[in-house]
Image: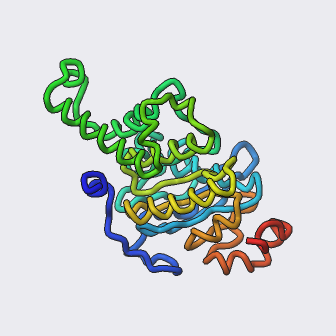
Amino acid sequence: MKSLTGGLAAKSGLIAGGAASSSDVLLDVREIGISFGGLKAVQKFSLRLPRAGLYGLIGPNGAGKTTVFNLLTGVYQPDSGEIQLGSQRLGQGKPHEITAAGIARTFQNIRLFPSLSVLDNVRLAGQLHNRHGLLSTVIRTRGYRCEEELLRQRSLELLQIFELQDRADELASNLSYGHQRKLEIIRALATNPKVLLLDEPAAGLNPQEKLALAESIRQIRDRFQVAVLLIEHDMPLVMKICERITVLEYGITISEGTPAEVQNDPRVIAAYLGAGLEDA
């Protein structure tokens, strides 16, 4: 894995269990907001995600969680606030520019290329950083062939992490729902992200698959030193793997802290009407 991890790894400055110091912060989100007509979908949302951090974003349905992801990835442009990734200021970039800068995501609804192979789904994402232009591609220069072979090997290495290497040549549409979820995460990793946004990755998975997913998310963070921000409705999974959690309700942050702090916050319990959190 040295060829792959060398391009993705970054030294972690995470302070376990605590908020990130200014020197640790990788993704710095400062009071971003957006309105649709008269509806304030997200108001003054802030987040300081450290390098190699594993944070959660939770809230009842309609709280604005996916809207936050859309703001972070350029799908929506914030009406206010700032987004900074390392030393680079984001916020008005287009989705492909945000991805190239180092923020990758998955979606609530699976968005694979079903008519392409499992391997080609990953390879397409990895081509984001290819250096060769149209002419090199058409005449298939030596440099182009070497780059494509390296991309193929890196894609297979990623598939191996999730034990999908043996299905590399199958159509993505032939995978089970759980394996398609895995493939979405692999495809996002193929862009060499600094920050990985996972939008309800456990949706539709059975208990055994959720356990495997939790282990995979930890493995991704530890192996590649990529920061992870997770939206998830499965409270036991969130409480088990996340170091810090932010809670939204009607687009407003009502709580932020460690899993224990959030779990015992009366505002959070009221927002969920006690459902799920006490059991978690």
Percent from the top left, x then y, of residue 264?
Answer: 74, 80
Percent from the top left, x then y, of residue 161?
Answer: 42, 52
Q: Is residue 144 left or right of residue 214?
A: left
Q: Residue at x 23, y 28 (%)?
A: 133
Percent from the top left, x then y, of residue 32?
Answer: 58, 58
Q: Is residue 129 above or below residue 210?
A: above
Percent from the top left, x then y, of residue 103?
Answer: 44, 51
Furthest-right residue in this view = 273
Q: Residue at x 22, y 31 (%)?
A: 132
Q: Residue at x 41, y 31 (%)?
A: 120
Work out whether residue 177 or residue 103 is closer to the camera in this orientation and state it: 177
Q: Is residue 277 left or right of residue 17?
A: right
Furthest-left residue in this view = 142
Q: Is residue 201 above or below residue 130?
A: below
Work out whether residue 241 or residue 18 is closer to the camera in this orientation and state it: 241
**Image colouring:** rainbow
Furthest-top residue in this view = 138
**Could you tell me which quadrant the N terminus lies in?**
bottom left
**Could you tell me which quadrant the C terminus lies in?**
bottom right
Name the quadrant containing residue 50.
Answer: bottom left
| Numbered circles on residues, count | 0
Q: Is residue 75 left or right of residue 233?
A: left
Q: Residue at x 36, y 42 (%)?
A: 156
Q: Is residue 124 above or below residue 201?
A: above
Name the quadrant containing residue 111.
Answer: top right
